[in-house]
Amino acid sequence: MAKSKWSVDATHSSIDFSIRHMMIAKVKGTFHAFDAHIEADPADLTTADVQFSVDLSSIDTRNADRDAHLRSADFFDVEQHPKMTFQSTKITKTGDGEYDVTGNLTIRGVTRPETFSVSFEGAGKDPWGNEKVGFSGQGSINRSDYGLTWNAALETGGVLVGDEVKVSIEIEAAKQG
């Protein structure tokens, strides 16, 4: 395939995360509103250009009070920083259909390089003849690197919220034009 523009089908895509809670469990969540601009040859992603934008107010951890706290200045401060963005800078092939995608991740006005492992899941045509591709991605970030440092000490030792955030991305995209 040649390099083409692809748009994310949000109804068949997701951006999910998990983080340790009280040192004993994990809390999971998702972002419902996001957009991406992808220019890529699915057969060789090393030349791709990938841009993501996530609406942080769309966070959903299945708890309204926690979601409101995450939107507040203690965490994402969505009034001042409504978006999280990612712009790819380097893509390295690590195996058959496997890649390390490095780019600049910006959260709360802080930009840092991050690398995510991405798998090309395949390509095909939907029942209406539209070309589709699928990708899965995983990685982790350190939330305190982005100024997300709110926490509370536990009586038993340790902290309420872990620092490592595991990220999981599932993308289905449609070829444009």
Image (cartoon, grey):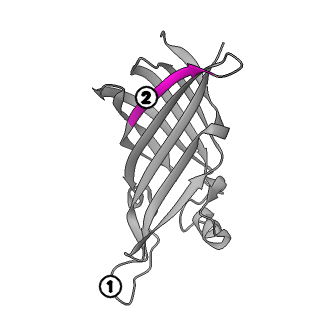
Q: Name the residue: 38% across, 64% down.
A: 163
Membership of 146 in magenta stretch? no
Q: Name the residue tied to disc 2.
A: 120
Q: Name the residue tied to disc 1.
A: 157
Q: Name the residue: 49% across, 29% down.
A: 50
Establish if 104 lies above or below 74: above
Q: Earlier in the sequence, mark 1 or mark 2?
A: 2
Measured as percent of width and height from the top left, residue 147 is found at 44, 60
In the rendered view, does 17 fall on the left or right side of 60? left
Q: Secondary structure at mark 1?
A: loop
In the rendered view, does 103 fall on the left or right side of 92? right
Q: Name the image quarter holding the C terminus.
A: top right
Q: Nearer the viewer, residue 77 or 176?
A: 176
Q: Name the residue: 67% across, 69% down.
A: 64
Q: Are marks 1 and 2 in contact (CB under 8 Å)?
A: no
Measured as percent of width and height from the top left, residue 140 is found at 38, 51
Q: Nearer the viewer, residue 108 or 23?
A: 23
Most extreme residue toward the top is 2
Residue 126 falls in image quadrant: top right
Mark 2: amino acid: Phe
Q: Nearer the viewer, residue 121 or 9?
A: 121
Measured as percent of width and height from the top left, residue 86 is found at 49, 38
